[in-house]
Image (cartoon, rainbow, N blue to C red):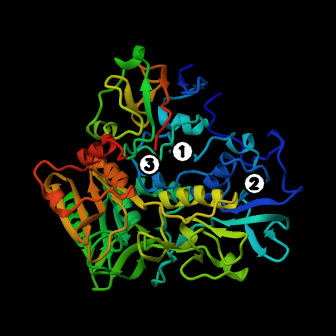
Amino acid sequence: MPTITYHQADGQTQVVELEKPARIMQAALRNDVPGIVGECGGQAMCATCHVYVHEDYVDALPEIGEDEEEMLEVTAAERDARRSRLGCQIEVGTPGLECIEVDVPDEQV
Amino acid sequence: MTETLNGHVNETSSTAPRVDTAADTPGVVIIGGGQAGLQAAASLRDEGFEGSVTIVAEEPGLPYQRPPLSKDYLRPRPEGTPAEPLPLRGPGFCAERGITLLAGVTATAVDRVTKTVHMADGTELRYQSLVFATGARNRQLTTPGVELPGIHGLRTVADAQALGAALGAARDVVVIGAGFIGLEFATAALERGCHVTVLEFAPRPMGRALTPVLGDWFAGAHRGLGIDLRLGEGIESFEAGGDGRVAVAVSTTGDRYPADLVVAGVGVQPNDGLAAAAGLETDNGIVVDAHLRTRDRDAYAIGDCANFPCVQAGSPFRLESVQNATDQARHVARVILGEESPYTELPWFWSTQGPFRLQMANIVRPDDETLVVGDPEAATFSVFCFRDGILAAVESVNMPGDHLAARKILARGITITREQALAEGFSLRAAWKEHATAPVPA
């Protein structure tokens, strides 16, 4: 089954199993994964679902859209040139991106 | 952990770490299971509150996010894949934290002498502290014919489900009111291929919240999308067709608009009746002080239902926004735990209307001096609002980076003058970055 693995700054890890494709932010909210806020409900308007994608998965990601690019410039935790993405913009459990592992930053707001 | 979409509806603290339940020492009772109520419960636990926490929520099911209901939720989607509301927290959240969520339960009376909340099902709850997070309800039209089938409001997930289904068969949609909800719905209906007319009595869309310059821009922009936006024109009556459903909307100018689906988005009224009946002061909402406390030291009000002394508005104010609900919830939790500080968070808002993503940092005032920065023709620009020559609020269209930078600048009280903003190469993002990386003065 497709999974999203969230690695927290404090060393804890949560693994969410997906019964169907889901975005990183929404899956976190539905499963009480801490550290992902999703303040705007997934409109790429708040940058509170910032995650660092593990290197192995970076090349499989969709391109960064214009809105996401702008939001990534103003994230609370520092942007990583390659690994920073918004969780609301990445759908997992789809062909080409069955699973993903992300690091959750220690601040979002 | 498994992605479970159909979680428990009534969560209890039975599996939770040992905390007092309602049967033991009275703790905090929160009336309302929306953004404000749930955040207040979560923040009480985050701040270390150990007594019982009970949420009385009128709607059944898990508390969910309302904003997407008038946006993503109404998008066209493949047959057989119904939209699901986005929960505020997962199904295990309350139980894991020892929060009792009474979903589908209505509070009917509050006795402040015995500190008891009475419920419609005959049960009662004792409290030490009481938080009203009762939200708001849609203002109802009194227009003749308003009871006809085919006329909808939009507030709950049930409303959104009904509308989503109705949109599939609708051709001519009439929206009453060019506020946020009305225009969000109008653009969603347009994307679903409907012909959309919006009637607004005021001279501008979103006139209560936006600067005139941005209101005028939105009027043109929505017409450019193909919405028939009628300003200075209210609703007079609805007429039925042969099938008994709504067929025509007649406006105050006597114009007749074909309508097989009508949505009324004419604002909301605070749910302050329960507080008023309990003898608390109400005036366009439950009146609270800067600590979000009513005149009863043990009763508080937060979110859409609260009329509070708003520093930014400079007067008693009631705000309808996710930000106001969650920030006041976090604040009230700290006050209940003994912190005596005033609520001062910067208000901010957003609305997604088709291709236009509108964000506002702070409340604009009618006499603000405005400066348009960016490219309105390309629908990427901000409106800077100055008070006494200092940046006081920013409205942004498709400029989320500007918005976030503006929020940070305004919340920290960083001074940006009109002259600075007019300087070559000025940007809010650069101004914020410069400040954020500047050495802290000794």
Q: Residue at x 48, y 83 (%)?
A: B142
Q: Nearer the viewer, mark 3 or mark 2?
A: 2
Mark 1 or 2 closer to N-term?
Answer: 2
Q: Nearer the viewer, residue A66 or B234?
A: A66
Task: Give the CA separation, mark 3 to mark 2.
Answer: 27 Å
The answer to whether residue A104 is above or below residue B168 is above
Say few, some or many: other residues with alpha carbon within 10 Å of mark 2 (under 14 / 14 to 19 / 20 or more): many
Task: Point out the image quarter for the N terminus of chain B.
Answer: top right
Label 1 marks a residue whose chain is: B
Whether the residues at callouts 3 and 1 have beta carbons within 8 Å, the answer is: no
The answer to whether residue A77 is above or below residue B399 is above
Q: Which mark, by number, is residue B84?
A: 1
Say few, some or many: other residues with alpha carbon within 10 Å of mark 3 (under 14 / 14 to 19 / 20 or more): many
Q: Residue furthest right?
A: B24
Q: Which mark, by number, is residue A40?
A: 3
Name the side, left or right, on which B121 lies relative to A109: right
Q: Nearer the viewer, residue B217 or B72?
A: B217
Q: Residue furthest top?
A: A56
The answer to whether residue B208 is above or below residue A45 is below
Name the side, left or right, on which B111 lies relative to B82: right
Q: Nearer the viewer, mark 3 or mark 1?
A: 3
Q: Nearer the viewer, mark 1 or mark 2?
A: 2
Q: Residue at x 68, y 76 (%)?
A: B275
Task: Give the CA separation, mark 1 to mark 2.
Answer: 28 Å
Label 3 marks a residue whose chain is: A
Q: Which mark, by number, is residue B53?
A: 2
Q: Residue at x 44, y 56 (%)?
A: B70
